[in-house]
Amino acid sequence: MTANSLTIRDNRNGKEVELPIIDGTMGPGVVDITNFYKEFGLFTLDPGFRSTASCNSKITFIDGDKGILLYRGYPIDQLAEQSSHLEVCYLLLNGELPNKKQFEEFSHTVTHHTMLHEQMAFLFRGYRRDAHPMAIMVGVVGALSAFYHDSLDLRNPRHREVSAFRLIAKMPTIAAFSYKYSVGQPFVYPCNRLGYSENLLHMLFSVPCDNYVVSPVLAKALDQVLILHADHEQNASTSTVRLAGSSQANPFAAASAGIGALWGPAHGGANEAVLKMLHEIGDEDHIGDYIKRAKDPHDPFRLMGFGHRVYKNYDPRARILRKAAYEVLGELGRGDDPLFRVALKLEKIALEDDYFVSKKLYPNVDFYSGLILSAMGIPTNMFTVIFSVARTVGWITQWKEMISEEGQAISRPRQLYTGEVHRDYVPIYQRK
């Protein structure tokens, strides 16, 4: 990195201080304000962290204006088309793509960590049948530390590695068990001869009384969904994982915190909102009315799945899932699906209409992922659970990067206090 500086002048007293400017390998540089409070006696205020970098990271790069997403320098479209989710997991964790031997060893390790401790089945039975699967995920993932406490020494690199393997391997099993419990079906155990996404589909949809064959087309599409959601820089859930992990919380607790953050409809629940919107529109003939409503500033209706906090161009992940949606619906004989036709027409309008183009409201990844998952038979309350499975590798990779940093310290944001000034306590019998 190269360092320049930015001169800041305090007009209250004329004091000037030079703050270092640090350049990364790509994207905007940052102004190092570590000593800002020391020099000026002031905090900085940036609600939502719209202009604040909270860490250094070598994992994921996003250029929202150009629609670029890179994992360890590799374009997301190349990985989604040519790689597998497990290979991407290795890349994120280790910084490089594996050779054949490395991938075989990694795949074998993950595959043979997919089983849950048998006593964990009792945890699921403690929930109501109608409990939201994400509520179950928060609890069960956090409970992993009670069953796998042999690898929780955060100072031990091998322990950190084993915890990563366990989270990546066991998350699909926990997700599938959460679903099976909610529908009253018996738990289906992992099958070591199946690939990562194949195994997830097998655990979700097979039953002991029938022979379930996993479609290669559906497995490939699900693998792409997992790849595209594996990491996304310092989003809300990843930042939560880093924040929780900075206190030296174990990785299972940190991941549980991330699941809680992902549960929010503004984060992981967006694809569910897209599907609800498409059902509400219902037919291509109704699209015009809903477009008018979306443009009306006084109407609360909003087109879901358009625009993104980071991307001000076409979300590169949406283009990949658009193709995957065609393939999945074709495989299932639903190529003429009315919801898909509504989605395509909405996308065409958004890419051509001056209103949407001027506001850069392009389709994002959530626009198609809900259609794909729904077509596979995955209910809407499981969409965010699948997102959790995908994002697990990103969370644990970011956690490992953070915990191994030299000088790593607990995160402690500051605030602008706007409450009451000093007041003396008045005994209750003297109060009016």
Image (cartoon, helix red, strand yellow):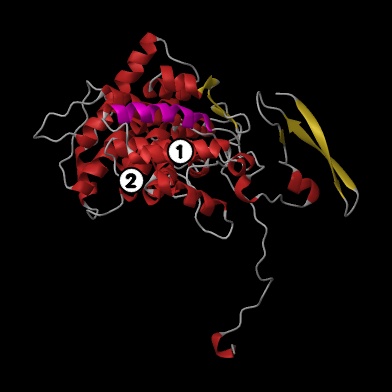
Look at mark 2 in the image and give the residue it sits on.
380
Judging depth in this view, the residue of 241 and 89 nearest the camera is 89
Q: Rounded to the nearest whole Å, what is the CA distance between mark 1 and mark 2?
A: 22 Å
Q: Residues within 10 Å of mark 2 (few under 14, many from 20)?
A: some
Magenta part of the protein: which range? 315-330
The residue tagged with tag 1: helix, strand or loop?
helix
Residue at point 18%, 26% (across, down):
213
Q: Is residue 250 visible?
A: no
Please tell me which residue is depicted at 30% across the width and 36% down the height of the picture: 375
Name the residue nearer the viewer: 82 or 291.
291
Q: Point out the residue furthest to the front here.
A: 285
Residue at the disc numbered 1: 345
Q: Is residue 269 left or right of residue 351?
A: left
Q: Main secondary structure of the magenta part?
A: helix
- Residue at the outermost left position: 209
Q: Position of residue 205 (x, y in %)?
A: 21, 35
Check the image and report above or below for 269 versus 59.
below
Question: Which mark, residue 296?
Answer: none
Q: Is the residue marked by circle 1 packed among few (<14), some (14-19), or many (20+) residues within 10 Å?
A: some
Q: Nearer the viewer, mark 1 or mark 2?
A: 1
Question: Which amino acid lies under the numbered mark 2 shown in the image of this protein?
Answer: Thr
Where's residue 108, x and y in %?
A: 30, 19
In the rendered image, which quarter contains the N terminus?
top right
Which amino acid, mark 1?
Answer: Lys
Foreground of the two, 229 or 425: 229
Q: Position of residue 284 (x, y in %)?
A: 41, 44
Tell whether 429 sits left or right of 97: right
Q: Quadrant of residue 202?
A: top left
